[in-house]
Image (cartoon, grey):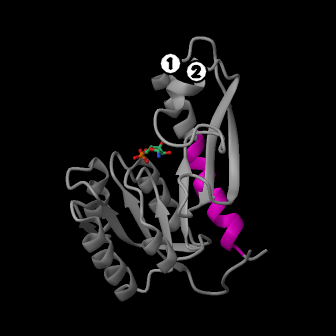
């Protein structure tokens, strides 16, 4: 699916925490050939570490606490529309977006998940993969639909689980691959050959 020609996709990245994927996507977007331009950072957590990248890279940020999810989503939709956002990248965003929100940006929301979907949807993926004695885990970039971690898969990367891996060591190994996979998936979708 090659969606556009000359213009870079105006992108919003949604985060909740550290923002290493956000930082990585910003760096990717700054490459001349990158198909995206990151215009907004949205967070559900005003203390998210990743918000530092807003100042560092001069990208507008907004936080919403989601206590009233319906109202906040409405505000976010308005804000994204005002900024002509045409791609949303969820990157460690811990809130589940409503059906209505997703409908408003149909086919335009991507997510990265730290497992080989459809295995290990949801939380504690590394713990569960190790507990089940899996030989491999990995990460997946997929389209977001209203079913949790279930939209069409764009790309996956396998990571070997070593005998001595803990959820922490495994998450670090997988995160390195996430940083490679997210830009690769975006390029696959949106770069003309
Ligand atoms: C990543 O492992 C991502 O896949 C998961 O949460 C983590 C976020 O890391 N959903 P970061 O905030 O991008 O550093």
Q: Is residue 21 visible?
A: yes
Q: Is residue 120 a member of the stretch shown in magenta?
A: no
Which image quadrant for residue 121? Answer: top right
- Ligand 1 within 8 Å of disc 1? The answer is no
Residue at label 2? 130
Q: Position of residue 25 (x, y in %)?
A: 49, 59
Query: Magenta region: which residues?
Result: 177-191
Which residue is painted at 32% across and 70% down in the image? 59
Residue at label 1? 166
Q: Nearer the viewer, residue 135 or 38?
A: 135
Q: Nearer the viewer, mark 1 or mark 2?
A: 2
Residue 112, relative to residue 189: is it above or below?
above
| In this picture, residue 47 sits left or right of residue 133 | left
Q: Is residue 30 visible?
A: no
What is the count of numbered marks? 2
Position of the N terminus by quadrant? bottom right
């Amino acid at each position: 699916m090659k969606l556009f020609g000359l213009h870079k996709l105006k992108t919003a990245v949604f985060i909740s925490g550290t923002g290493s994927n956000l930082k990585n996507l910003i760096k990717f977007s700054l490459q001349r050939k990158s198909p995206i331009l990151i215009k907004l950072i949205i967070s559900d957590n005003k203390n998210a570490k990743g918000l530092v990248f807003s100042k560092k890279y001069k990208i507008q940020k907004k936080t919403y606490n989601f206590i009233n999810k319906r109202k906040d989503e409405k505000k976010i939709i308005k804000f994204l529309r005002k900024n002509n956002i045409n791609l949303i990248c969820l990157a460690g965003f811990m809130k589940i977006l409503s059906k209505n929100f997703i409908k408003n940006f149909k086919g335009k929301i991507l997510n990265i998940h730290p497992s080989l979907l459809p295995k290990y949807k949801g939380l504690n993926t590394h713990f569960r993969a190790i507990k089940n004695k899996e030989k491999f885990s990995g990460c997946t970039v997929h389209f977001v639909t209203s079913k949790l971690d279930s939209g069409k898969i764009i790309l996956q990367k396998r990571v070997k689980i070593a005998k001595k891996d803990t959820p922490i060591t495994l998450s670090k190994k997988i995160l390195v691959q996430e940083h490679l996979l997210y830009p690769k998936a975006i390029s696959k979708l949106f770069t003309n050959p």
